[in-house]
Each structure stands twice: as structure tokens, then as C-alpha cells.
Image (cartoon, rainbow, N blue to C red):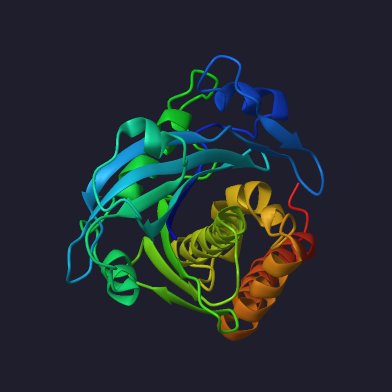
Amino acid sequence: MFGEVHTELLRNSASVSNASAKRILSFRLGDDIRTSTRPTSYAVSSDLYDGLDCRVGGATRQRGVGTAVSFASITGGQIAQAVTMTSISHGKNNRRMPWSYYLSRPGQVETMGNEPVWAQIADGWATADKVGPNLGAISDRLLDTVQMSPQLSGAAAVRRTGRARLRWVYTGTAQPLRLSFSLESDDLRLLRLSGGNLSPRAAADFCADLALHDWLLTALMEAIERSRLESDDGTAAVQKLRPVIVHLLHHWMPAARLDAEGKELWCGLDEAAGLSRQWESLVARVRDQLAIGLLGAVAQPDRA
């Protein structure tokens, strides 16, 4: 299975209600938008499908035909995500079938020719932007559609928070479930999963949750760096961080909507990568500086 998750702050000056989120995520008449309010507001669109006919990567560069499934979501009324994924298997017909055949198998791509070397296909997808199905372009287009909604003001509540990408690949084997997570560039993360028996939706939900919390951590790190928190004028630094404190800190709820297997994956990854430890350390820095600023304001004599 391949997938790519794009995450970005919603371009609106405040959080949107679930009712507004449902209107933003209604891409077609009659779409069933699922929402929840616990532990935080969440809305997710109906699945959308795109046809694929391309080389699937790897040294063999085999042709694959089928469809990709994508969906968009809004978490906490402020964080927008677009997820695109597909499962690749070797076709039994060994020839190009009519589109009706592939449309009856949503979210699946079949290869033609000899049985592919799956490790090569996985490596090709994971390491190159233009090898195999361009799922990132589908996620980009879907997230752009969300951000262009007339329901939004067009200005994000926190400035200079960019769009992040998480590309993932899952190879099913008889081995126990394993994963590796790496930072490929400022805006690209790579997650490799292998083993176990993950369903496509379970894998996509885990990757979306990881992408959201990695984006939050990155946004907080960059905001602290821009604020010059350790400068002499700590009060000014805290003022620069105010939008982050108001709009982002409360969204940290890892694995809140994942099933038991997803929670186990998160715990294993978090223990190795230390995402929660880093988040807690950064939040403590911000709150300590805020407390110092308040104490300084109280200690100043009244000049009236």
C-alpha cells in the first residue's frame, strides 16, 4: 500500500464549527460527512476516487492500472488534511481491462506482466517524487479545494505555518509489524511499515494521525525559533507566540481516534522517536517564559 498525507492550518482567522466543516468538506451533492466532538471536533469527507494508469516504480517499471482513494478532514476546526492511498497487487488477467473492471475495485491498482519485485516498487515510491502514481498531486489538489472554500476567510490564525507531506509505504508480510520514520526534508517525512495485517484504512488513519502531530511539533519548533524566546525581551517573545498558544497547543492528542493496533503503533514510534517528550519539553519552555513574564509584570512598581 502507498499513500501520502498533506497537512496544513486551515486558512481561517478562527476555528470552524462542525457544521461549517461539513459544508467545507461537501465536494459533491449528497456527500455523507462524518463528524464527532469527542475528544475534539473532527469532520471527514466521503471517499473520492481517481483513475491511475502509470508505471509503478522500481527497476522493472511495470505498468499499473486502477484507482486511488482520497479523503479530506478537519481536526479541531483548524487543521486540514488530505489523504490519498492505493493498494497495489499483481493482476491475474495480465492485460489492460476496461475501466469498469477497475472501478469495481476502488482503491486498488493491478500490475501487468511478470510478478513484480515488491521491495523494488516500495523503494521506488518512497524515494522519488515522480516514480509511480503521483498520489501527492491528488492530495495537493484536494487540500487546495478545501482551502479555497468560501466558508473560510483566507487568512490563517497562525502565520508562517507551511504545508507538510508524509509519504508512507506498507508491505504486508508474515513477519511482525515493524516501522521506520525519517525526516527527508523540511516539508517531507517518510514512514515505512512492514509485516502484520493492516487494512488500508487503518494504515491511512495511523499515518494521518502521525502527520498531524509531526506538523504540530514542527510548527511549534519553528514558532519558538522565530520568537527568539531566550532573548532579553522575553515579554515580546511571548507575545509573538500568543497565536501558537491560543490556536495550536490544545490539539496535541496522539492516537485519540485510532484503534488498538494504531495505538500500539503510535506507542512504539513515540518511544523510539520521542515526539511526545519533545513536545512536552517545548510546551514547558513556552509556559515557563510566560510565567517569568507575568512575574516580571507584577514585580514592576506602579508608575502612575
Q: Position of residue 212 (x, y in %)?
A: 56, 56
> Looking at the image, which residue sits at the far front?
93
Residue placed at 33% from the left, 37% from the top? 51
Foreground: 148 or 161?
A: 148
Q: Is residue 39 left or right of residue 5?
A: right
Quadrant, the N terminus: bottom left
Image vertical order of residue 169 relative to residue 157, above or below: below
Determine if residue 292 is in view: no
Residue placed at 82% from the left, 45% from the top? 38
Q: Quadrant of residue 30?
A: top right
Image vertical order of residue 300 relative to residue 147, above or below: below
Q: Position of residue 240 (x, y in %)?
A: 54, 53
| Count of labels in the image | 0
Determine if residue 70 is in view: yes
Q: Position of residue 97 (x, y in %)?
A: 29, 39
Image vertical order of residue 14 relative to residue 182, above or below: above
Image vertical order of residue 248 relative to residue 102, above or below: below
Q: Quadrant of residue 167?
A: bottom left
